[in-house]
Structure formats: structure tokens, C-alpha cells
Image (cartoon, rainbow, N blue to C red):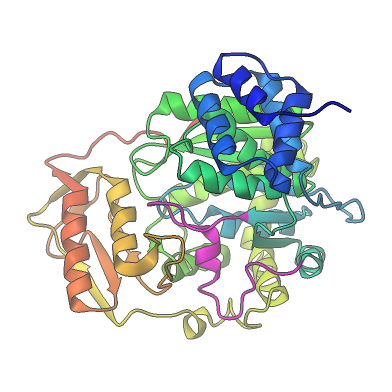
């Protein structure tokens, strides 16, 4: 029996070589079982960041990481298992609307999501604003929730793609998070382990995205679609604009309110619903629940307007421990901030540009995000009624309403918003919300 030396795999990639499946499988096994040292994993990540990976290497890395733990089997369900993943943004509550919407159309959505990362909000943090919601349930409860409600949004468990959990933690402290092959493998390994039939990706670009430059975001989208195809997972990616917040709220409880309002028809932000419906329509076609995008949109609109999507959301919340009357009485259950005050501009004008990342950082400064992994999130704080591009701002139309714990926090947030918004004399030309479809 031959002896495996991880340093030889590192050396080969460092020198620009192409790793074979056996090299990658053995290295990933060492990540999962602890035989690969942190220093070796960090060196491997840096070698990949600098040298890149070919398509076959990305597929092998993704599959090896997916196989490092438990793989879910949904073959007993009467419909396809479908999922959506976003690369993160400000005000992005699409998952909260999409999962029950697709479930109402006959899909099953076992969505494994994350917490806030840097300046971007996390779907799990939003859902944990709901009292009693179990964001990391045991697998048997997760399976039951998916079967009963058609959708369940939870966090990654220790059993699913454990190599990714360790690998990501080391990448986070070795300046290698930005590697496109490693991002691709991290995202897709969890999706393969979740036992999906099809996936749709929302890859964001712009001032509020991790991939600010469009070209870089497109490179990631292509890598994800190609790698997923190579691993046998049909995937479509949409490139969407994050040069402005998505929707009118940014925070945790405030975004849950906006999502529920969209599901019930109480209030729907056009850009938010455009992204949600486009992604959901792609999923229905990929899953065989609609023959084309036009037919998919008809089904989705019927589920939304008929109240079935809102009913699925309530069933998901109930199945995972939340209040049984949450949708009907969400304001009685969601936490509220002590202070709500308008952020007035320094002078009137038209919103010409937005530093969306600065808005995300302002939510963090209020306590709605984490500076360190062990920080507790204040689910009540954030912004509502965020002004959009082209909006006329003045004394009767603030930049946003601030939800804060103290007057000092609110004043600091107001100043941050004034710096984040650039006012102009005329309405700017709006870029399309969805720039391109890859797949």
C-alpha cells in the first residue's frame, strides 16, 4: 500500500500542475479526518488561488468534498428536490419568498443557507428573528419539515460536507476566500450533499456584492454552471445587480416582514419580485414542473396570488418550531427596535448612486451583523423604506427609516446613510436588474 504525502499534492499545484482525481480525493479526505494539517490546507488553498484549477479539477474537488460526509436521499418524495443559492447582497431576502413559492408549485426545497458574512446579510439570521425557529435542526426534523411543508431553510450541519466546513474556516484566515475554484467547490459540495435534482444560482455583482466587478462575477457564474454540469447537477445562473439594495428593507426582522408582505400580496417591491420570479421560473423548468419559462411564471403567479405560497411559508415555520400564527400575526412575534427615526439627507435631490456596501456595514454597526464569528446579532435593528435610484429625496422623503436601540446608534446610522447616498440633479438611467443568464 502506497503512502500518501499531502505536501506532494501542494507542490504539484504550486508548480502549475494539474491534479488528478486521486490526488484531490486523498487531500480532501485528509481535510475531513484531520490528517492534513491546517498549514497544509492553507498552503493548498493559496496554491489554488494563484494557479487556478481546470474544469476537471474543480469537478473532482467538488465531488470529493460532497462525499466527505452524509449525503441526503430524497427519492421517496413525490416531486423534484430543487434549490437556489445566492452569493450574497444587501436586502436579499429572495430565499424566504422563493422556497415556499416553489414548494407551492410542486417542488421540494431542502435549502441549506448561511449566516451573514462580512457586510452581507444571512438568511439564517433573518429566520432566527422568528421566535422558536430551529435554524439547525436534527436531520430527521429537517426531512420531516421538507416532506410536510415542501420547503425547509436550515444551516449546514456537521454531517453534510464536513471537509468544506474546515476548509472554509482556514480559507477565511489565509486570504484565499476569493479563489473562484474554491468558492465553486464550497457552494456546490453542499448542494450535491443535499441531494438536489436541480439548482439555480443568483450571482451578484456591484457595490454591495463580494464580486464587485461584473467580469469577475461572470467568471464565477460560468465556473459554477460548468462544474455543476460536470458533477451531474443541472444548474442555471443569473447575474443580478447589487449596485443598490434589493427591496426596501435591510436587516433581519425587517426583511422577514418584507418577505411575508410579498408572499401575502400586502406589498411587493418590483425589483425583489423580478429576481425572485426569474430564479423560481428557471427552477420549475429545470425540475420538470413547467415546460417553459412562460408556463412557469403562470404557475408561480397563481401560487402567489392564491395564497398557497404564504401558506407554505407558514407550514415551514410551524414545522421548524415557530409560531403557528406567524404569517397572520407576524408583528406580534417579530422583535422591534426601541427607536425608529428618519434619516434625512443633507439637502434635497434625486438619488443618483448608492454605495450599497456602506449600507450593509451600517446595518452591522447597528448590531444587525457580526464583526466576529461569536458576536450576537440584534434581529430588531436595520433600515426600512430605503430610497432607491431616481427617488426624489427631501424633508418629506428621508433616505430611510432607521430601527435602532439608542438615539446615538440612530444618529451614527443616519450619518452613514448620508455618506452612502449620492444625490444628483436628474434621474439616472437604471441598469437592468438581471444582466445575463448563464446555462
Residue 417 in picture, x, y percent from top left = 21, 56
- The front one of 73 and 346 is 73
At x 51% / y 24%, what residue is drawn? 219
At x 37% / y 37%, what residue is drawn? 206
| Left or right: 421, with 312 as reference point | left
Quarter holding the C terminus? Answer: top right
Q: Does the magenta stretch include residue 306?
A: no
Residue 29 in picture, x, y percent from top left = 75, 40
| Left or right: 373, with 212 as reference point | right
Q: Does the magenta stretch include residue 124?
A: yes
Figure check: 337 above or below 269: below
In which quarter of the view is residue 111 placed?
bottom right
Residue 415 in picture, x, y percent from top left = 15, 60
At x 74% / y 20%, what residue is drawn? 20
Residue stretch rendered in magenta on the structure: 113-138
At x 44% / y 56%, what residue is drawn? 121
Q: Magenta span: helix, strand or loop, mainly?
A: loop
* Residue 227, visible in the rendered structure: yes
Q: Which residue lies furthest to the left in this view?
A: 347
- The front one of 283 and 172 is 172
| Left or right: 229, with 349 as reference point | right
In which quarter of the view is residue 58 placed?
top right
- The front one of 420 and 432 is 420
Figure check: 289 above or below 379: above
Q: Residue furthest right?
A: 76
Amino acid at each position: 500500500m502506497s503512502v500518501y504525502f499531502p505536501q506532494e499534492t501542494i507542490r504539484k499545484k504550486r508548480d502549475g500542475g494539474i491534479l488528478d482525481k486521486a490526488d484531490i480525493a486523498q487531500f480532501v479526505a485528509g481535510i475531513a479526518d484531520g490528517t492534513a494539517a491546517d498549514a497544509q490546507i492553507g498552503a493548498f488553498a493559496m496554491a489554488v488561488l494563484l494557479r487556478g484549477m481546470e474544469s476537471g479539477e474543480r469537478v473532482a474537488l467538488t465531488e470529493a468534498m460532497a462525499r466527505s460526509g452524509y449525503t441526503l436521499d430524497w427519492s421517496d418524495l413525490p416531486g423534484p428536490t430543487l434549490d437556489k443559492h445566492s452569493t450574497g447582497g444587501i436586502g436579499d431576502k429572495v430565499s424566504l419568498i422563493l422556497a415556499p413559492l416553489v414548494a407551492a408549485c410542486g417542488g421540494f426545497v431542502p435549502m441549506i443557507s448561511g449566516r451573514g458574512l462580512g457586510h452581507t446579510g444571512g438568511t439564517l439570521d433573518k429566520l432566527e428573528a422568528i421566535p422558536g425557529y430551529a435554524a439547525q435542526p436534527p436531520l430527521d426534523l429537517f426531512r420531516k419539515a421538507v416532506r410536510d411543508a415542501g420547503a425547509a431553510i436550515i444551516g449546514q450541519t456537521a454531517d453534510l460536507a464536513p471537509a468544506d466546513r474546515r476548509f472554509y474556516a482556514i480559507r477565511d484566515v489565509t486570504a484565499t476566500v476569493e479563489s473562484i475554484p474554491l468558492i465553486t467547490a464550497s457552494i456546490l459540495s453542499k448542494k450535491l450533499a443535499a441531494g438536489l435534482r436541480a439548482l439555480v444560482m443568483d450571482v451578484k455583482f456591484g457595490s454591495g456584492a463580494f464580486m464587485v466587478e461584473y467580469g469577475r462575477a461572470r467568471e464565477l457564474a460560468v465556473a459554477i454552471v460548468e462544474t455543476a454540469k460536470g458533477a451531474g447537477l443541472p444548474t442555471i445562473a443569473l447575474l443580478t445587480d447589487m449596485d443598490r439594495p434589493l427591496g426596501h428593507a435591510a436587516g433581519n426582522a425587517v426583511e422577514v416582514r418584507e418577505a411575508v408582505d410579498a408572499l401575502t400580496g400586502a406589498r411587493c417591491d418590483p425589483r425583489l419580485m423580478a429576481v425572485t420570479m426569474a430564479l423560481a421560473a428557471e427552477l420549475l423548468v429545470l425540475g420538470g414542473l413547467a415546460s417553459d419559462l412562460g408556463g412557469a411564471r403562470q404557475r408561480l403567479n397563481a401560487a402567489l396570488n392564491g395564497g398557497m405560497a404564504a401558506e407554505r411559508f407558514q407550514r415551514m415555520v410551524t414545522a421548524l418550531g415557530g409560531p403557528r400564527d406567524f404569517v397572520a400575526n407576524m408583528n406580534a412575534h417579530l422583535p422591534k427596535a426601541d427607536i425608529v427615526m428618519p434619516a434625512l439627507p443633507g439637502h434635497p435631490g434625486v438619488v443618483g448612486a448608492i454605495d450599497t456596501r456602506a449600507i450593509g456595514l451600517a446595518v452591522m454597526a447597528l448590531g444587525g451583523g457580526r464583526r466576529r464569528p461569536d458576536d450576537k446579532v440584534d434581529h430588531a435593528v436595520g433600515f426600512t423604506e430605503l430610497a432607491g435610484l431616481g427617488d426624489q429625496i427631501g424633508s418629506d422623503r428621508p433616505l430611510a427609516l432607521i430601527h435602532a436601540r439608542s438615539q446615538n446608534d440612530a444618529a451614527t446610522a443616519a450619518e452613514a446613510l448620508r455618506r452612502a447616498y449620492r444625490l444628483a440633479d436628474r434621474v439616472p438611467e437604471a441598469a437592468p436588474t438581471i444582466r445575463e443568464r448563464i446555462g
